[in-house]
């Protein structure tokens, strides 16, 4: 079945540094790759997404890259700030009815 | 801004009891979901619902679970006989369409504690 692997599970960076989170997926039919941010005790919320016909997308300090051949995609956060501290989930969607999530990365940004 | 709403926010129940979690998806959305998140773990897919029927379900969604859309607005998850391992945060989500542009909008979650 579908599987999404996410690394690292925990990431600690100094404020202002960059953070990179990587995911690999197994289902070659996946065509939509969203990233969700979940603050403590809150709901997951979409922060950026990328479709399979695009290799890279950027939105201010956040960027996502996709390598469909290798079946991996990454989230890049530049100039990190303390409010970026949260759990980040990658996910895949095949165009069917479900979105499958990775295990999550707990990001700590130290001031 | 429209949002998915869930009730109750927290429910405590005894093992073996039935629980119903309620959700009101965003009004023009067509696809509805329940996800589960055990404390500190990943968001796990339970079931998707479209056109008044289940479209996909996971291995977790066994015979103890059922979903229903009893009217035009509510979407419910029922657990018939709760087990200790059902303790988790249950998120309802909805999506406008299932195509490539399909952002999932989550509710605030219902925390279920089974004693």
Image (cartoon, coloured by chain):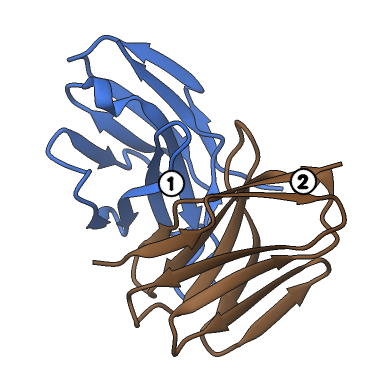
Chain colours: A brown, B blue
Q: Secondary structure at mark 1?
A: loop
Provide the chain ID for the residue under circle 2.
A
Give the residue at x 22% y 13%: B15
| Alpha carbons under labels 2 and 1: distance apart | 23 Å
Residue B96 drawn at (x, y percent): 51, 63
Q: Which mark is residue B43?
A: 1
Q: Is residue B102 left or right of residue A107?
A: left
Q: Is residue A87 left or right of residue B25?
A: right
Q: Which mark is residue A109?
A: 2
Please indicate, yes or no, whether residue A62 appears anywhere in the rendered image: yes
Residue A81 drawn at (x, y percent): 84, 50
Give the residue at x 47% y 22%: B8
Give the residue at x 82% y 43%: A82
A32 over B111 or under it: above or below: below
B19 over B24 or under it: above or below: above
Residue B55 drawn at (x, y percent): 26, 60
Mark 2 residue crowding within 10 angstroms, few (<14) / some (14–19) / many (20+): many
Residue B83 drawn at (x, y percent): 21, 22
Q: Quadrant of residue B62?
A: top left
Q: Which mark is residue A63?
A: none
Q: Looking at this rendering, what residue extends furthest in the left direction?
A: B63
Q: Quadrant of residue B17?
A: top left
């Amino acid at each position: 079945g579908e599987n999404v692997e996410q690394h690292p599970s925990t990431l600690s960076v100094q404020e202002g540094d960059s953070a990179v989170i990587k995911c690999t997926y197994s289902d070659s039919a996946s065509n939509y790759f969203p990233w969700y941010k979940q603050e403590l005790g809150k709901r997951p919320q979409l922060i950026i997404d990328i479709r399979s016909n695009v290799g890279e997308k950027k939105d201010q300090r956040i960027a996502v890259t996709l390598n469909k051949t290798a079946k991996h995609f990454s989230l890049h956060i530049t100039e990190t700030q303390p409010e970026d501290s949260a759990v980040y989930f990658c996910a895949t969607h095949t165009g069917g009815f479900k979105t499958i999530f990775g295990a999550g990365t707990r990001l700590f940004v130290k001031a | 801004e429209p949002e998915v709403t869930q009730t109750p926010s927290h429910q405590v129940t005894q093992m073996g009891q039935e629980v119903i979690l309620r959700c009101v998806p965003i009004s023009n959305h067509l696809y509805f979901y329940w996800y589960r998140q055990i404390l500190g773990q990943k968001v796990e897919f339970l079931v998707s619902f479209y056109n008044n029927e289940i479209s996909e379900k996971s291995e977790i969604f066994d015979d103890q679970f059922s979903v229903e859309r009893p009217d035009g607005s509510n979407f419910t998850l029922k657990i018939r006989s709760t087990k200790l391992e059902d303790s988790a945060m249950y998120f309802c989500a909805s999506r406008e369409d299932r195509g490539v542009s399909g952002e999932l909008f989550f509710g605030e979650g219902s925390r279920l504690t089974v004693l």
